[in-house]
Amino acid sequence: MEFFLPGLFLFLVSIAITALLAPKATPLIASFLSLAFLTYGVYHHHRLFAAEYRLATWQEGLKLYAPAVMIFAVVLVILYGVLSFFTS
């Protein structure tokens, strides 16, 4: 019970803050905050699992195909955008 009540209080306070601040936030602020949190999350994850990233070698063979996969994905996105723009 001693761990439940402070956690519940923190949860309720975070809901209240979100309910008060989220409607006032613009999409630009939301995008900057999401980018900052994503950057921090990737940095923290990489710092936490640095040894596992160093020992991971099975991805080395896939590096050869990465540019082709990205070009294919970009072409698909462009085609989807053009088709959705000109069709209903």
Image (cartoon, grey):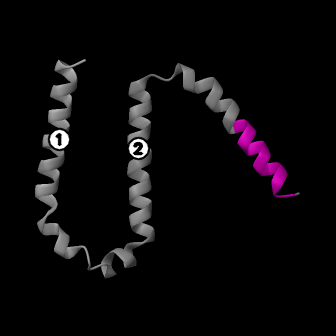
3 is within the stretch colored magenta: yes
Q: Which residue is at the far right? A: 1
Q: Residues within 10 Å of mark 2 (few under 14, many from 20)?
A: few
Residue 77, quarter of picture: top left
- Quadrant where the image shows the N terminus: bottom right
Please tell me which residue is depicted at 82% across the width and 54% down the height of the picture. Answer: 4
40 is within the stretch colored magenta: no
Please tell me which residue is depicted at 12% across the width and 49% down the height of the picture. Answer: 71
Residue 36: mark in rendering: 2
With 7 as the anchor, is 61 left or right in this view?
left
Residue 45, quarter of picture: bottom left
**Main SS of residues in magenta:** helix
Q: Is residue 30 above or below residue 11?
A: above
The secondary element bearing badge 1 is classed as: helix
Please tell me which residue is depicted at 22% across the width and 25% down the height of the picture. Answer: 84
Q: Nearer the viewer, mark 1 or mark 2?
A: 1
- Amino acid type, callout 1: Leu
Residue 10, quarter of picture: top right
Please tell me which residue is depicted at 34% across the width and 74% down the height of the picture. Answer: 53
Q: Is residue 39 above or below residue 59?
A: above
Residue 76: mark in rendering: 1
How far across and how far down the image is residue 22, in percent? 56, 26
Give the CA distance from mark 1 to mark 2. 28 Å
Q: Is tag 1's residue or tag 2's residue first in the polypeptide sequence?
A: 2
How far across and how far down the image is residue 86, in percent? 16, 19
Q: Which residues are magenta?
A: 2-13
